[in-house]
Image (spheres, grey):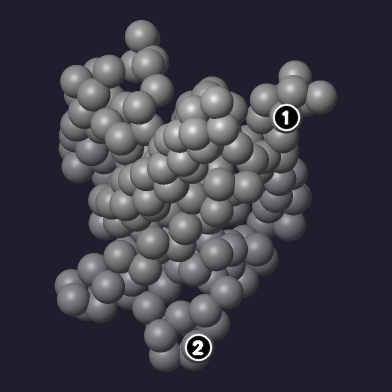
Amino acid sequence: MKKYRELPFVSAGLVLINVVIFLICSVTGSRLYAAGGLSVLEVVRKGDFGRILWAMFLHSGIEHIFNNMVILFFMGAMIEKEIGHISFAILYFLSGIGGNLVSLLNKIMSNDWSMSIGASGAVFGLDGVLLAMVLFSGRKMSTVTPTRVVLMIILSLYNGFTGAYIDNAAHIGGLITGFLGGTIVCVLQRRRIESTYNHCNNDL
């Protein structure tokens, strides 16, 4: 049973959903993009708040979805195994939503009426969760160190800022949301483990 609990059901499921939606978009053209893309006009003026979530499942091309899904599956599987399926799912969606909210705020402040799509905010949130894990979880992860995670985050942000047509506000928002959420989860899990350990010692 423990073996099955450690399988990355959520990560694999999210990848599958994203790929299926991308294939549907490839057949239906711009219909789903028009219905789910993130923009100030549709969300703020028309009140279509569902786009804050739906935009996370839309991608502009093969390279866009491939990069996001590779990171989601491999990093997601590692994080999901450490913190559990439910906590992982909550942090993933919170990161994506947080990233899109920051993106909307940035668009409003810069008078940007463009439309954004992609799971990048949620994926950057996984970077934030991983950083929180190596700092606060108390787990020993020999191949994952704070320095390596910080360098990975810096490189990812640099690639975003030097690229074209990239919603860096969503990346930063997702990263911060993932780090804050991951910190809370790690602290709570660590306290629960310490409480169980102390309770067992008291029983002895």
Residue at the spot of label 2: 47
Of tags 1 and 2, which is closer to the observer? 1
Residue located at (49% from left, 90% from top):
46
> Residue 113 lies in what quarter of the image?
bottom left
Q: Is residue 26 visible?
A: no
Q: Quadrant of the N terminus?
A: top right
Q: Is residue 194 visible?
A: yes
Q: Nearer the viewer, residue 13 or 5?
A: 5
Q: Is residue 72 above or below residue 152?
A: below
Residue 5: image tag: 1
Tag 1's secondary structure?
helix
Mark 2 Cα-neighbour bin, 10 Å: few <14, some 14–19, many ≥20:
few
Q: Position of residue 25 (x, y in %)?
A: 68, 52
Q: Quadrant of the C terminus?
A: top right
User: Considering only order in the chain, which callout, 2 or 1, is on the residue closer to the N terminus?
Assistant: 1
Q: Nearer the viewer, residue 175 or 41?
A: 175
Residue located at (72% from left, 29% from top):
5
**Would residue 78 appear left or right of 157 to someone viewing this image?**
right
Residue located at (41% from left, 42% from top):
191
Q: Position of residue 156 (x, y in %)?
A: 27, 32
Residue located at (37% from left, 68% from top):
101
Q: Position of residue 127 (x, y in %)?
A: 36, 36
Q: CA distance from mark 1 to mark 2?
A: 39 Å
**Would residue 115 appear left or right of 161 to someone viewing this image?**
right
**Would residue 146 appear left or right of 22 to someone viewing this image?**
left
